[in-house]
Image: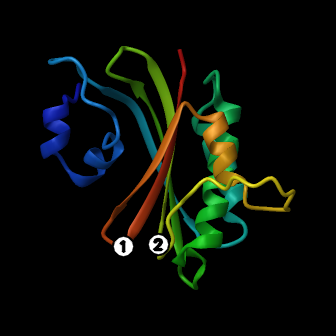
């Protein structure tokens, strides 16, 4: 099924959210998600490991699967550390997306949706050597594009890489 920007704009929220940050391109050019897989994880210390395993299995054969596994690990860790997902009963949703973008280039991406927080994701830039706090800097370095958005009380941070 081919989804045009118009269909995404008027479609269900989960489809609108997937492509929210893709810029408008030539008229009539479509985006086609080839594969979308989602898994809910408990908001515990085990979530990053479970998420890495899920993403690795979902992206077998992808040229940049290792980058996306690392990206997912960082995003899940941040979700547990900085959101309400760490509370009892908290959840983190991990979505793996493979598809073709507006320019006909294959892409693969990961979205991590948490239970929300008051803080905004930002890349830490510091000359001091610290033990932690560089997850989004690593995501920025490994991905071709990344971003975040909020729907209701839940926050989603996503990253994508070209796969062809």
Mark identifier at residue 153 = 1
Q: Residue 49: x, y in percent?
A: 73, 56
Q: Residue 125: x, y in percent?
A: 69, 52
Q: Secondary structure at mark 2?
A: loop
| Quarter occupied by the N terminus | top left
Q: Are marks 1 and 2 in contact (CB under 8 Å)?
A: yes
Residue at the (47%, 76%) spot, across then down = 118
Residue at the (67%, 47%) spot, across then down = 137
Q: Secondary structure at mark 1?
A: loop
- Looking at this view, name the residue that lies furthest to the front: 127
Above or below, 71 against 30 in this view is below
* Lateral position of residue 41 relative to residue 147, left or right: right
Q: Residue 18: x, y in percent?
A: 35, 44
Instruction: State the residue position of label 2.
Output: 115
Residue 23 occupies which quadrant of the picture?
Answer: top left
> What colouring does the structure picture have?
rainbow
Q: Earlier in the sequence, mark 1 or mark 2?
A: 2
Above or below, 80 against 51 in this view is below
Instruction: Using the rendered image of the protein, determine whether residue 43 is visible from the camera's viewpoint.
Output: no
Q: Residues within 10 Å of mark 2 (few under 14, many from 20)?
A: many
């Amino acid at each position: 099924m081919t989804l045009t920007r118009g269909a995404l704009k008027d479609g269900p929220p989960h489809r609108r959210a997937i492509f929210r940050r893709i810029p408008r391109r030539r008229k009539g050019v479509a985006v086609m998600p080839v594969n979308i897989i989602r898994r809910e994880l408990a908001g515990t210390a085990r979530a990053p490991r479970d998420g890495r395993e899920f993403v690795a299995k979902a992206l077998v054969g992808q040229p940049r699967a290792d980058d996306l596994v690392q990206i997912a690990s960082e995003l899940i860790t941040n979700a547990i550390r900085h959101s309400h997902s760490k509370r009892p009963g908290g959840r983190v949703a991990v979505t793996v997306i493979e598809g073709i973008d507006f320019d006909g280039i294959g892409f693969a991406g990961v979205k991590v949706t948490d239970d929300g927080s008051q803080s905004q994701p930002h890349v830490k830039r510091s000359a001091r050597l610290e033990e932690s706090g560089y997850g989004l800097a690593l995501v920025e370095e490994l991905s071709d594009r990344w971003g975040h958005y909020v729907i209701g009380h839940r926050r989603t941070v996503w990253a994508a890489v070209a796969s062809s």
